[in-house]
Image (spheres, grey):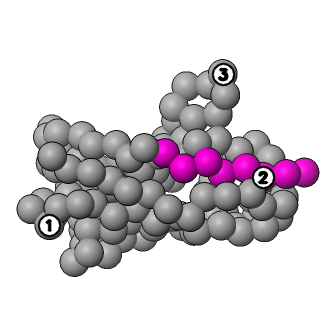
Amino acid sequence: QVQLVESGGGLVQAGGSLGLSCVASTRRYNFYAMGWYRQAPGNERELVATIRSGGSTNYADSVKGRFTISRDNAKNTVYLQMNSLKPEDTAVYYCYARTSSSGAEYWGQGTQVTVSS
């Protein structure tokens, strides 16, 4: 059983920064992809950013230029640096990992990010 454990959420004022991290409980996989999704109240879960094991990244248009995703393959850890935060970034942020292009998916328990105006 793979567990993803997030940390780093919290409350920040608009324009501020926060960093999230997520570590996988196993070294069994070099995950094909890891990333972050978010879900605000009343909204569907949406992609924030993903990163493949080779380093290629994908960002939602709403966070491009403000958020940076990175990973440490040796530690099976993925990070999300969030700068210039806006109130509309307020959501529960979920860590995500996939073992291969069509393999099993795993999700973290979520961490709350709240941006005050």
| Residue lying at 67% horizontally and 58% vertically, measured from the top left | 10
What residue would you read off at disc 1? 27
Range of magenta residues: 110-117
Coordinates of residue 64 in the picture (x, y in percent): 61, 57
Name the residue carrying label 2.
Answer: 115
Q: Where on the picture, by quarter, is residue 53?
A: bottom left
Q: Residues within 10 Å of mark 2 (few under 14, many from 20)?
A: many
Residue ID for mark 3: 42
User: Is disc 2 placed on a helix, strand or loop?
Assistant: strand
Q: Taking the image as drawn, is residue 50 in sight?
A: no
Q: For the residue labelled by badge 3, is the local secondary structure a helix, a strand or a loop?
A: loop
Image coords of residue 97 (percent x, y): 29, 50
Helix, strand or loop at label 1? It is loop
Q: Main secondary structure of the magenta part?
A: strand
> Nearest the camera: 82 or 8?
8
Image position, residue 75 (x, y; %): 26, 75
Give the residue drawn at x 71%, y 45%: 90
